[in-house]
Image: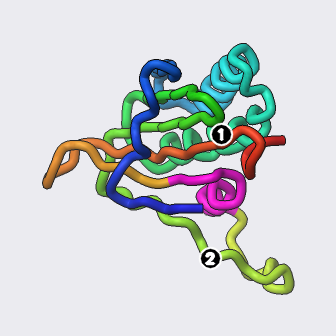
Amino acid sequence: MTIAALTPPAPPDTASSRTHRLSTANRDTAAREVRAMVCALLGATGHAGLTESAALCVSEVVGNVHRHTRSPLVQVVVTLAEGYVVISVRDDEPQREPWPRELVDARQLADVPVSGYGLCILQELTDRWGVTRYGGLLPESKAVWFRLDDGARGAA
């Protein structure tokens, strides 16, 4: 897995890829709404094997936008390419640095917070993930993105 902090994934070949964009209000139902749309899109476009991992990862990333930002909208971009899918979730608070918690030994679970492991889920289920900031030296937004490859780590 690769964690890239500054650059988005390379753009796919536009002749063989399709990009879908959706936005929804940043509310407590946003993760469920986006998850349903993304899973339907993957199922309809030949990427059904990625729906379980995509559903969990989308829920975590959209849930983080809802819990940790005041962005009015959750903006999602799904790029479907030959053999893989890239999903990007954008918010308007680039200064909030997403970073995964350290994984802990199961014997220490009584002393460990029950939340904050969403990015660890991305690390385990995706083939690549990262954070991209938009707006130059004074960024105005950021996106957490992840890539799921057909037949690889993210496939069911």
Bounds of the magenta segment = 115-129
What percent of the width, then of the height, locates residue 8? 38, 46
Which residue is nearer to you in this view: 127 or 141? 127
The type of residue carrying mark 1 is Ser
The residue at which mark 1 appears reads as: 59
Q: Which residue is disc 2 drawn over? A: 102
Residue 18 versus residue 125 in the image, above or below:
above
Figure quadrant of the C terminus: top right
- Image coordinates of residue 26 in percent, x first then y, are 48, 30
**Is 37 situated left or right of 92 in this image?**
right
> In percent of the image, x 63 and y 46: which residue is there?
60
Residue 29 appears in view: no
**Tally of numbered discs:** 2
Image quadrant assignment for residue 39:
top right
The structure residue drawn at horizontal position 42% and vertical position 23%, both measured from the top left corner, is: 14
Circle 2: residue type: Glu
Disc 1 on helix, strand or loop?
helix
Most foreground residue, 142 or 27? 142
